[in-house]
Image (cartoon, helix red, strand yellow):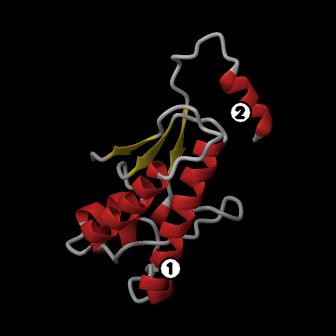
């Protein structure tokens, strides 16, 4: 992290905006290799069938406590990006990623707002190590 911070602060292009993308793959997750290990906001009959998700398997659906931990992780990740000298994070809520599932599901919008609020709070509490403003961006489209 210190190496990147030095690079960012001494860049010959100080106006260059460099950021990181925050996302969770949701139903496309493969955390342990090539095997699909989905985590979903809700069961969807067409997508469950297409990706081989058992529609009766409740273990793949996010619980409230899972979501609280996820929000915490997004906030920590945004803070680390900020502290490392990145100028923004782009939160992916599109193209079938997990947050896209929440944004299109009837109860999911509230979860998305909580995540973004947590990250916004992180951006407001900017550390002394970050000399520039830090932005939270949202990619929210199909």
* Disc 2/disc 1 C-alpha distance (Å): 32 Å
Query: Residue 134, relative to residue 122: is it above or below?
Result: above
* Residue on which disc 1 sits: 66
Q: Quadrant of residue 105?
A: bottom left
Query: Residue 75, relative to residue 21: is it above or below?
Result: below
Q: Looking at the picture, how far across and down is residue 128, in whole percent?
A: 62, 42
Query: Residue 29, relative to residue 94: is it above or below?
Result: below
Dividing the image into 4 quarters, which one contains the N terminus? top right
Please indicate whether residue 48 sits to the left or right of residue 60 in the image.
left
Q: Nearer the viewer, residue 73 or 79?
A: 79
Q: Nearer the viewer, residue 17 or 67?
A: 17
Seen at 52% across and 43% down, the residue is 21
User: In the image as oriented, which residue stretches furthest toward the left?
Assistant: 106
Mark 2 lies on a secondary structure that is: helix
Mark 1 lies on a secondary structure that is: helix
Seen at 45% across and 66% down, the residue is 51
Please indicate whether residue 99 sits to the left or right of residue 10 in the image.
left
Q: Earlier in the sequence, mark 2 or mark 1?
A: 2
Q: Which mark is residue 24?
A: none
* Residue on which disc 2 sits: 5
Q: Looking at the picture, how far across and down is residue 76, in whole percent?
A: 58, 60
User: In the image as oriented, which residue stretches furthest toward the front?
Assistant: 128
Seen at 58% across and 70% down, the residue is 37
Q: Looking at the picture, how far across and down is residue 97, in whole percent?
A: 42, 56
> In the image, which is nearer the foreground, mark 2 or mark 1?
2
Q: Nearer the viewer, residue 70 or 40?
A: 70
Q: Nearer the viewer, residue 74 or 2?
A: 2
Seen at 53% across and 19% down, the residue is 16
User: In the image as oriented, which residue stretches furthest toward the right?
Assistant: 3
Query: Residue 61, relative to residue 115: is it above or below?
Result: below
Within 10 Å of the Cα at label 1, are there few (<14), some (14-19), or many (20+) other Cα atoms? few
């Amino acid at each position: 992290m210190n190496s990147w911070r030095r690079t960012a602060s001494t860049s010959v292009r100080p106006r260059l905006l460099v950021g990181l993308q925050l996302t969770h793959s949701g139903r496309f997750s493969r955390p342990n290799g090539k095997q699909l290990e989905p985590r979903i906001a809700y069961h969807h009959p067409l997508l469950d069938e297409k990706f081989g998700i058992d529609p009766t398997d409740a273990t793949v659906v996010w619980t409230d406590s899972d979501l609280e931990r996820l929000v915490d992780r997004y906030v920590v990740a945004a803070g680390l990006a900020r502290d490392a000298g990145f100028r923004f994070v782009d939160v992916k809520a599109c193209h079938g990623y997990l947050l896209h599932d929440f944004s299109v599901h009837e109860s999911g919008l509230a979860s998305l707002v909580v995540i973004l609020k947590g990250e916004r709070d992180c951006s407001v509490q900017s550390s002394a190590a970050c000399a520039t403003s830090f932005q939270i961006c949202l990619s929210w489209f199909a």
